[in-house]
Structures are given as structure tokens and as C-alpha cells.
Image (cartoon, helix red, strand yellow):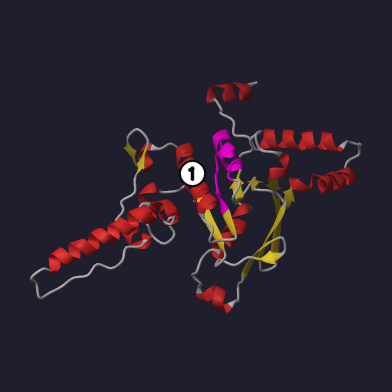
């Protein structure tokens, strides 16, 4: 179990995480935590933050993390495939391609491209007073020549993908990056997924090479209780369910076992944080009774 600590001014949030933590919220409580991670992952510094000496600290097991040695990747339910294909510095596809092209299996092919470019330069330079030389081709130069696009049976853009497919596509890229990127000590995935389905939960469980902090307002029974933190008036991390049990026992007028309290928590999450389809006709019938 890992302890992830996020500090922003006087605010400190602690999460005990094996691999993934679902922070379930009833309001926008999560926003300050999410913005703190985004700010830590940003190189930009506003005049306001400079004047007030704002400093975000993220620690793993009480050891402070740096951006140089750790990779932070944001996923989002508002992800734009069209924008990401532009391969800007924050592009997830760019990170994926950088890792993929550094795989040894492509070294011979990249070397062959270099030889072909040298041969082309020699042909161009024959009987010419102006000679040319091609620079050696590395993965960064090759990426500039690429035009990425999503395809299964047909080429698709973001308007052809449903909500779940957009999330799963991002997680597919993250999975490859985390498994094949040996430059960083940790890969930390974070973001907000409003409507989190069972397929997404299963995919997140299989991301064993990364740590995930996923903010959502939707509980799924496939989440293990130790993977859940609830943020209502305060933050409660159920990986420490024994501590919650002690606190609850002090407030309750009845004696419960630890297992009973765990079942009560799960039932509370199911009742209050599970997306339910509603029918206006049935609802109006209930109101009229």
C-alpha cells in the first residue's frame, strides 16, 4: 500500500493506494484536489502564485516527488481526440508515440531510414554546386512526419466514439506508456470521470504499472471498498476502514461488527452514488400518491 500526500497551502489530503483510488464526491469538493495536481504538473506560474509563494507538494510514502523523475498523466471525460492529434506538448498521443518509437524493435527500421536519406542526399548532390545533407532521424523528427488517427474497422474521430470508448482509448494509451516507459520512477494517472462504468473499472484495475487518482460521483460494485475514498463534508479513505469503524462506533448507539459497518458503507454508496435511470412518468405517478 502506498501513501500519496497532496499539499496545497494549509490543505493536506492523504490517500492510501495499492494501484487505484476512486474519490467519490457529492459536490465539487474534488476540484481543489484535482486543480492542485494539475498545478503541480504545470510549468506555468501566474503573477498571483508568484507573489503569494504558492507551492504544491506531492509525496509518495513521505518522499517528495519531482516532475523530472515522475510522469503525471491526466485523463478526462472531456478529452478531445481532434485536439490531441495535433501533438502539442501536453498531448497524450504524443507521449504514447514518444515511448513507442523508443522501443528497440524499431531501431533497425529507423537506421534504414537514415541510410536512405543519406543515399538521397548523395544523388541530389551529383554535379551540383549546392549540396544538401539530411540530419540524422530520431524519434522526435519521425513523430513530426506522422498523422495519427483512431481506427478499428473504419477510421474514426471523437464524434464516432461514445463516452466509454473515449475513456477506454485514453486508458489504452496510458497502459502502454506505463508498461514501456523506464525513464520515470512512477506514472501517476489522475482525472475526473463523471459516469464511470464497469468496463472502465476493469481497465483501471489492470493498469498495474501506474497509480491512479480518479475523481467521480458514480460508485460501481466492482470497486473494492479499499479503493474508495468519499469526500462529503470531509475526506474519508476507506482503505483505513478500521479507523472509520472506531469513529463510527463512538457515534453509534448500537454495537456493530467491522463487517457489518463495511456492508453499511457499501449500501450507502450504492444508494447515494449509483447512477440510476429515471422515468418521468413513473416519477410523476409517485409524486401524485
Magenta region: which residues? 189-207
- Residue 1 versus residue 51 in the image, above or below: above
- Residue 130 versus residue 72 in the image, above or below: below
- Label 1 crowd bin: few (<14), some (14–19), many (20+), radius 10 Å: some
- State the residue position of label 1: 172
Image location (x, y in percent) of residue 69: 57, 65
Q: Residue at x 11, y 68 (%)?
A: 126
- Residue 268 versus residue 188 in the image, above or below: above
| Residue 76 in view, yes or no | no
Nearer to the camera, 149 or 130? 130
- Residue 285 versus residue 245 in the image, above or below: above
> How many dots with numbers?
1
Q: Residue at x 87, y 45 (%)?
A: 251
Residue reaching furthest bottom? Answer: 51
Image location (x, y in percent) of residue 97: 41, 53
Q: Is residue 284 magenta?
A: no
**Quadrant into which the C terminus falls:** top right
| Residue 263 in view, yes or no | yes
Label 1 residue SS: helix
Amino acid at each position: 500500500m502506498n501513501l500519496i500526500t497532496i499539499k496545497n497551502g494549509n490543505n493536506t489530503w492523504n490517500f492510501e493506494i495499492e494501484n487505484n483510488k476512486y474519490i467519490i464526491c457529492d459536490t465539487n469538493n474534488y476540484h481543489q484536489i484535482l486543480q492542485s495536481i494539475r498545478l503541480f504538473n504545470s510549468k506555468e506560474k501566474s503573477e498571483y502564485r508568484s507573489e503569494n509563494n504558492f507551492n504544491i507538494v506531492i509525496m509518495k510514502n513521505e518522499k517528495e516527488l519531482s516532475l523530472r523523475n515522475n510522469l503525471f498523466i491526466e485523463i478526462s471525460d472531456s478529452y478531445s481526440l481532434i485536439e490531441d492529434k495535433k501533438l502539442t506538448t501536453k498531448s497524450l498521443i504524443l507521449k504514447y508515440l514518444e515511448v513507442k518509437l523508443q522501443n528497440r524493435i524499431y531501431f533497425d527500421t529507423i537506421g534504414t531510414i537514415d541510410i536512405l536519406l543519406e543515399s538521397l542526399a548523395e544523388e541530389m548532390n551529383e554535379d551540383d554546386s549546392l549540396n544538401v545533407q539530411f540530419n540524422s532521424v530520431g524519434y522526435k523528427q519521425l513523430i513530426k512526419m506522422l498523422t495519427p488517427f483512431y481506427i478499428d474497422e473504419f477510421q474514426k474521430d471523437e464524434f464516432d466514439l461514445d463516452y466509454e470508448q473515449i475513456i477506454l482509448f485514453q486508458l489504452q494509451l496510458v497502459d502502454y506508456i506505463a508498461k514501456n516507459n523506464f525513464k520515470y520512477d512512477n506514472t501517476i494517472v489522475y482525472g475526473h470521470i463523471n459516469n464511470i462504468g464497469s468496463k472502465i473499472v476493469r481497465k483501471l484495475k489492470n493498469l498495474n504499472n501506474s497509480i491512479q487518482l480518479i475523481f467521480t460521483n458514480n460508485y460501481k460494485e466492482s470497486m473494492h471498498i479499499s479503493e474508495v475514498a468519499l469526500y462529503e463534508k470531509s475526506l474519508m479513505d476507506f482503505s483505513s476502514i478500521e479507523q472509520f469503524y472506531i469513529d463510527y462506533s463512538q457515534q453509534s448507539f448500537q454495537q456493530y461488527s467491522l463487517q457489518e459497518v463495511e456492508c453499511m458503507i457499501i449500501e450507502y454508496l450504492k444508494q447515494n452514488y449509483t447512477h440510476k435511470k429515471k422515468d418521468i412518468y413513473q416519477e410523476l405517478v409517485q409524486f401524485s400518491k
